[in-house]
Amino acid sequence: MSAGTAKLNVTVAEVKPINDLVTRFKFVRTGGGDLPTFSGGAHTVVEMQDGDITRLNAYSLMSNPADRGAYTISVRRDDQGRGGSKFMHSKVKEGLEMVISNPVNLFSLDLRAKKHLMLAGGIGITPFMAQMHQLSMMGGNFELHYSVRTASLGTYAKELSERYPGKVHIYHDDQKEAIDLKTLLANQPLGTHVYVCGPKGMINWVHSTAEDMGWPREAVHSEEFLAPASGKPFEVKCAVSNKIVQVGEHQSLLEALEAAGIDAPYLCRGGACGQCETNVIGYDGKFLHYDHWLTDEQKAGGKHIMPCVSRFEGKTLVLDR
Amino acid sequence: MSKTEFPPSITSRPVYGELEARSGSGHLMIADAEGAEAILDLANSADADFWAKAHIIYIPKKTGTKYSSQLEALGAGKYYAGPSYEAAQSRIRRALQDCHMGTQVYLSGTESLMGQAMAEATAAGIPHTAIQTEHRGSTARRMQCVHCKGITEDVTTDPFECSHCGLSLFVRDHYSRRLAAFQGVRVDAEDPGNIPEKVELFK
Ligand code: FES
């Protein structure tokens, strides 16, 4: 099977609300046994059977990578979203059997770094939690700067401050606290790598500030999962499988291909990994490219599309699938 | 002396570019002999505030004082001229220890100088792709004998004699970043005593 990676059958062992927006889920292997190892920064794709719709959302693993007994993820409820996070919050209960993918890491630590400087915004904290477990076991040098809206919405802020004293710095938006990025970046010893996970604006801010300050590109890492945008319904012809597929308003092109039984590859489902890249055979209309993968030239070229997040508006679109 | 065009070779053979002033919190420039010219050329395009944050470490070698007064006149925040790479090494290490992420590293001159300074800078944590280099001057090579592991500097002929074990060695393009040296392999291994005539390949 080319789509995604190998699947794991798991059972929900715990559902724990953390605050008004975030709930934590713990998965163990159905029937017992160890789960595959992973490295800090990895995510899993969770399959949700929501009536006749199958939703697949990627969530970062936040548990200790050395613990093979269980995986944990944290899900922030997004009322504006397409329903995946709402499904997790309302339908997923202890004892439910689910299918998740093997872990995939698109945000791994560069272990050549002499120091790891982590910048998190909101729920972007989760991959760092696994990375900090990993680094503290290895005796690695790290520092976390975590920006939260309010103390009560500061998911895990308190426990992290206690677990890693002196290494965790929390910034509260409602108290007008903000990461002083320029000063922070100016004072890092050679060999520091910076990692950022959070909203798009924060990621862009870190990349552009680091670049202006002369940081090597290789030392700046980021992860942003895009949720697929909704948009006008459209139709796509799949030349290889000889099918015509309708993409609904709240459905991604990738989801529509899957619903039509077409074997379409993916890993992150968030426009970051490049796995789902699909050749365009012909089109009449305009592309709405939302991914971080294709270059600007490729986006303008009309020969490629990333079906996990991008859409199309127009008369015809023919894909090599 | 002008820049050297090296013929295309195997992937381990380093390639060099042309120095350009980049934005950064500091500028560490390490050069030997004609490598000074690359820094002087870069000076034509650098902003006025570039030099205050610059630290130049220069090893004039045979060029003596030909470039040193011009380099000094650039007004770098720190300027040092030393007699040899070995003499400058502890200063280079110290400079790398003191600088922060965002510092740009510029290397120019011989392959031996650039290779050794590159190894120091990468060990200090700068990705090698972020370090600028420009070859100027002698193409003589720093060679490691793969048999006795001894290093012979300033090799200009192929084959050459290892300055440690005396074997005649064939000059390869195979390069070690860790040692900052090309590899020399016994030229008469198959047919002892059959040593081809030396050809002056490098100047
Ligand atoms: S699945 Fe990763 S970019 Fe589309």
Image (cartoon, helix red, strand yellow):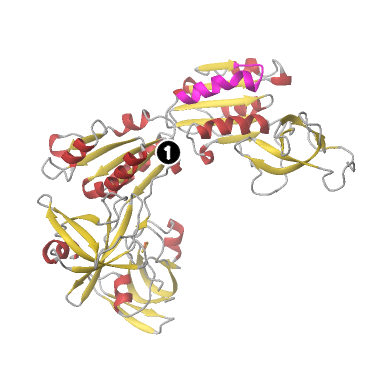
Q: Is residue A30 left or right of residue B187?
A: left
Q: Which portion, as a residue range, is magenta? A: B81-97
Q: Is residue B18 left or right of residue B203?
A: left
Kindly identify the residue that appears in the image at 61 percent across and 37 percent down: B18
Task: Identify the secondary structure beneath mark 1.
Answer: loop
On the image, the x and y values in percent for residue B87 come to: 62, 18
Residue A71 in view here: yes
Residue at which label 1 appears:
A113
On the image, the x and y values in percent for residue A252 come to: 28, 69
Subunit of label 1: A
Residue in front for this viewpoint, B80 or B90: B90
Quarter placement of the N terminus of chain A: bottom left
Helix, strand or loop for the magenta stretch, by majority: helix
Q: Is residue B138 left or right of residue A148?
A: right
Q: Tell me, yes or no, whether the highlighted magenta stretch contains residue B83.
A: yes
**Picture quadrant of ligand 1:** bottom left
Residue A231 in view here: no
Answer above or below: position of B34 versus A230: above
On the image, the x and y values in percent for residue A109 come to: 38, 45
